[in-house]
Image (tube, grey):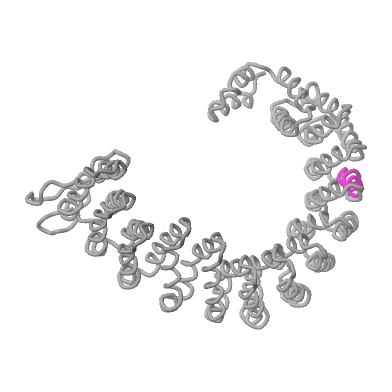
Amino acid sequence: ARHSITLSTSKMAGADGDDSLYPIAVLIDELRNEDVQPPLESLATVEETVVRDKAVESLRKISQEHSPVDLEVHFEPLVKRLASGDWFTSRTSACGLFSVCYPRVSSTVKAEIRQHFRTLCSDDTPMVRRAAASKLGEFAKVLELDYVKSDIISLFTALASDEQDSVRLLAVEACVSIATLLPQEDLETLVMPTLRQAAEDKSWRVRYMVADKFSELQKAVGPEITKNDLVPAFQNLLKDCEAEVRAAAANKVKEFCENLPEDSREQIIMTHILPCVKELVSDTNQHVKSALASVIMGLSTILGKDNTVEHLLPLFLAQLKDECPEVRLNIISNLDCVNEVIGIRQLSQSLLPAIVELAEDAKWRVRLAIIEYMPLLAGQLGVEFFDEKLNTLCMAWLIDHVYAIREAATCNLMKLVEKFGAEWAQNTIVPKVLGMANDPNYLHRMTTLFCINALSEACGQDITTKQMLPVVLKMSNDQVANVRFNVAKSLQKIGPVLDSNALQSEVKPVLEKLATDTDMDVKYFAQEAISGKLVFPPPAAETSLYVRFYRSGKPDDHAVFLSSSTNQLVNE
């Protein structure tokens, strides 16, 4: 029978626009599974890993389309051939196929599949053992519990003791799946000896994998084993001689602490984890400190106000003064955690120097990151603190020599106006932004226009029409063409915010003048604003002024009328 999975291939090829695959996809639509399998079997043996992986992926999908009988007749023999192939490539591919056919075959065939998998787990070639180790957890999930205990555990133990560390670290990954399958009483005897061994492995890559999977292992083994075995193991990983392992463990500190048994959580953290964390704050490796800084603030919600003030606050303050900008940045980016527990005021005196240093950092990506957190900081510190300490920084970013910083600073102002309101913007931000219109640097004058574009909607019609529009219109006479065509774009952008009188009497004449500009780009954007986006109202003598805004050359969903009698906008 033909199968729906093959039909989807041609649809996918067409959707992706890959014409080279389309004829093959059409052909496959007309083929049966027994026709498709031989070429896929051949592709599963080639040397190129990407091709092999795709062939195995296709075979796994095809296996789901077989009935149990067809699976034994057509598919299982293919898996056997790959598993006993001369080349390691075919044997590695076979490892990915056992789990998809095992659940739906007879007990006799199941026994054969288990035997083949056992054989591949002890294959002479490390690449095959790696492939088997990577699929061990997946295979364990489809086995009966008795066979998990009798077969999988012995394979897991053997692979976790393999001479190749690349095999051992994959066995650690499988440990998570295996532990979730076993009853609690079996974990201590069947899994934990091997896991303890992996946590102290001579290869840092294996220890790194243990650290990376620690939270998942913790959930799999349960609270009692966590208290007795994983807490000491986690301490050792946090003190590991390799920085990569310490960094991986540091990344898991918050999650590990969250998952500790509630009745003993605080005691374990204060006695066993916090001393290690204190050492990591002054670690010699910046990646370790940065990893810790990204999660340490989360401990405040776990430990509560008193412990945070007494034990964590000194660590936060130390990290805010760290020489590494990433450390300071990670602390600042997670301030919301502390704000919920103790409020941010206790950090404000140390925050300010850290923010200033990051704001002026030589690396523009660091400056960019602190800009993105500024609205959050402003909301937590309050408008008074912001105006006094941070406003100057935000304005300085608008004239940064890197465009990405100027762009982000513009977006930052918009978010600040949304947070603090239009009245605050009118008194604090707008005058400074408009003052840049007279800056001798044309890039800074253009930034004024970008800010107006961003702020017009948040500030509202009154501020935009009375304060911003005159500046934009004046800039239409700028000597630099780039500024003039950005004036046209700005008028197009703020048009929907303006009242119809301003559109007709002030905006339209300026755009018509720019449409005759000597510069081709200025002319283009002015004409686009006139014809493509805004249709100006008829003269004001009529009873009502009709304004329709266009987007992408099409009328908007509704028209807007300005009644001359009430001077109010009415939506239709």
Q: Residue furthest left?
A: 541
- Residue at position x 83%, y 65% from top? 241
- In-image side of 212 versus 160 (left or right): left
Q: Is residue 59 above or below residue 537?
A: above
Does residue 250 sit above or below 282 in this rendering?
above
- How would you classify the magenta stretch by its main secondary structure? helix
Relative side of 249 to 371, left or right: right
In this rendered view, identify the residue nearer to me: 207 or 72.
Answer: 207
The location of residue 474, given as percent across then percent down, is 23, 58
Kindly identify the residue that appears in the image at 80 percent across and 43 percent down: 134
Asked if one can make out residue 224 in the rendered structure from this viewpoint, the answer is no
Q: Position of residue 473 (x, y in %)?
A: 23, 56
Image quadrant assignment for residue 346: bottom right
**Location of residue 563 by image quarter:** bottom left
Magenta residues (range):
147-159
The x and y percentages for residue 10 are: 58, 24
In the image, is residue 550 part of the stretch drawn in magenta? no
Q: Position of residue 189 (x, y in %)?
A: 91, 57
Please name the residue shown 56% across and 23% down the image: 19
Task: Please say whether residue 152 is one of the residues in the magenta stretch.
Answer: yes
Determine if residue 195 is in view.
Answer: yes
Query: Considering only vertical position in the picture, is 175 above or below 38?
Result: below
Q: Quadrant of the N terminus?
A: top right
Q: Quadrant of residue 421?
A: bottom left
For image coordinates 92% across by 40% down, the residue present is: 122
Horizontal arrangement in the rendering, residue 479 relative to residue 404 (left or right): left
128 displayed left or right of 408: right
